[in-house]
Amino acid sequence: MPANERRVARGEYPLYIPDSLTSLLELKGLPVKFIAPKEGLPYVGYDLALLKNAPHPNAARLLMEYYLGKTMQQSLARLGLLPTTADALTGVDPAVAQIETTKLLGTTDPERMNEMLSLAQQIYR
């Protein structure tokens, strides 16, 4: 996947969808532009959970606090991953920060996953 933007720049593809925000900074200097659709950016949500009767619940809470903390959220934002809060965009490349504040589309819904997989099977026979 990382080479696909360069393939667009070389003229092998007229456009490339989907793309990843993590490759946005690598586009600098290439004759291509990352465009966010007006409808919004698709995304995949990442969840943290503490299981009931976990063997080390305090360690799990510390890990969750670390992932949700400002330092880690800024690190994720600098990589082109969406942070949980806008204040994590401080110090992030302006081009990345602009895209990361774009409206978001919905993401996967676990309760509808089987229904959506069946629909995809019908569409893409």
Image (cartoon, helix red, strand yellow):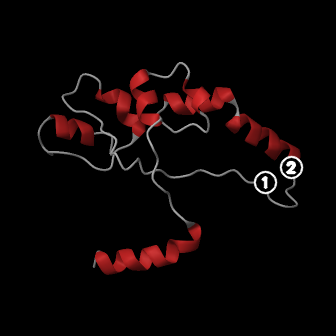
Q: What residue appears at the point 39 percent right and 42 percent down from the top-left corner?
A: 20
Q: What residue appears at the point 50 percent right and 38 percent down from the top-left corner?
A: 81
Residue at far top of view:
91
Q: Is residue 54 left or right of residue 1?
A: right
Dividing the picture into quadrants, the one containing residue 102 is top left
Residue at disc 2, secondary structure = helix
Residue at disc 1, secondary structure = loop
Separation of disc 2 and disc 1 at Cα?
A: 7 Å
Judge the density around disc 1: few (<14), some (14-19), many (≥20) Cα neighbours within 10 Å.
Answer: few
Q: Earlier in the sequence, mark 2 or mark 1?
A: 1
Q: What residue appears at the point 45 percent right and 53 percent down from the top-left corner?
A: 105
Q: Is residue 61 left or right of residue 94?
A: right
Residue 120 in the image: state x and y as whole percent: 36, 74
Query: Is residue 125 visible in this depiction of the protein?
Result: yes
Which residue is denoted by mark 2 in the rendering? 57
Residue 60 in the image: state x and y as whole percent: 80, 46
Q: Is residue 121 left or right of residue 113?
A: left
Dividing the picture into quadrants, the one containing residue 116 is bottom left
Which residue is denoted by mark 1 in the rendering? 50
Residue 21 in the image: state x and y as whole percent: 41, 38
Q: What residue appears at the point 80 percent right and 38 percent down from the top-left corner?
A: 62
Of residue 107 and residue 63, the one placed in the foreground of this image is: 107
Three-letter code, disc 2: Pro
Residue 84 in the image: state x and y as whole percent: 61, 39
Q: Which mark is residue 21?
A: none
Tell me if residue 56 comes above or below residue 31 in the rendering.
below
Dividing the picture into quadrants, the one containing residue 19 is top left
- Is the C terminus in the top left, top right, bottom left or bottom right quadrant? bottom left
Judge the density around disc 2: few (<14), some (14-19), many (≥20) Cα neighbours within 10 Å.
Answer: few
